[in-house]
Image: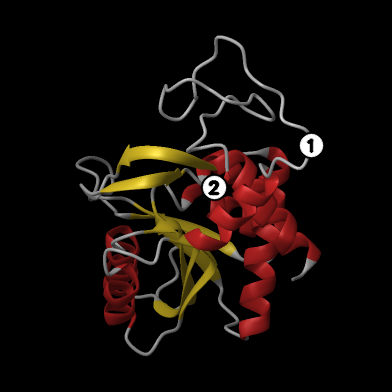
Amino acid sequence: MHPARQKLLSTLAHKSFRLGEFKLSSGGTSDYYIDCRTTTLDAKGSRLTGEVFFEEIRQRGWKPRAIGGLTMGADPIVVAVAVVSGELDGFLVRKAEKQHGTGQRIEGFREKGARVVIVDDVCTTGTSTVQAIEAAREFGFEVVGVMCLVEREEAKGRPNVEKAAGAVPFVSLFTANDVRKEHILQNDDTHPVIFAVAAACEVCGRPAVTNNPRDRCEAHRA
């Protein structure tokens, strides 16, 4: 794995991934939660995001004029890639058209017929990515690639995005399982156990059996 890509994965695992019981925006539940914005809005994480996305785009040979996606998950990714690349412009897709001013849904780069790449942070059901693809095409862009930072590999996200994308490739930089594995490695207790005193597990609230590196019960110490 390229050094920048590995560093980005490590940052996601450290800053964006949490184990526990969570309700998702899709309505489902999960034993983990990933908030990519704590990485993509981090100073070093933003730079890594821009580098890895831009390198993947170059390797794919898509040669876009701009990148964009649905606000707000895509926002920091779009800015990071635009700044790092120094050549790709960015655009943002509103969730609905403005009810004032020009009433436009696409903000930023607006050259009809231009080759563009759609980006997103997390793909679960793929709804936000699909909305961005449809809005970009409706405006008049030529979508040549679709990317997400982390794919959860559930809720039919990939099939939904691929159906909307058609012949255009959909690329995920990491899967949620990639990030989970890295998170577990980072929190692997390779040192002597330090037993917690009068502490509760930060995941479930049960009595903690260790505080190295965090307060965890026996079930969540991994």
Give left or right: position of 100 versus 62.
left
Coordinates of residue 120 in the picture (x, y in percent): 44, 59
Coordinates of residue 100 in the picture (x, y in percent): 23, 40
Identify the coloring.
secondary structure
Give the image quarter of residue 162.
bottom left
Residue 83 visible (yes or no): no
Give the image quarter of residue 105.
bottom left
* Nearer to me, 88 or 19: 19
As displayed, is residue 9 above or below residue 43?
below
Q: Nearer the viewer, mark 1 or mark 2?
A: 1
As displayed, is residue 132 above or below residue 218?
below
Q: Most extreme residue toward the top, as rendered?
A: 198
Residue 36 visible (yes or no): yes
* Nearer to me, 188 or 136: 188
Say which label, 1 or 2, has the lower sequence index: 2
Coordinates of residue 167 in the picture (x, y in percent): 37, 90
Coordinates of residue 142 in the picture (x, y in percent): 41, 80
Q: Secondary structure at mark 2?
A: helix
Q: Residue at position x 27%, y 50% from top? A: 95
Identify the residue position indicated by label 2 in the image.
76
Amino acid type at image mark 1:
His
Quadrant occupied by the C terminus: top right
Give the image quarter of residue 156.
bottom left
Amino acid type at image mark 2:
Pro
Which of the numbered marks, if any, corresponds to residue 191? 1
Give left or right: position of 50 versus 145.
right
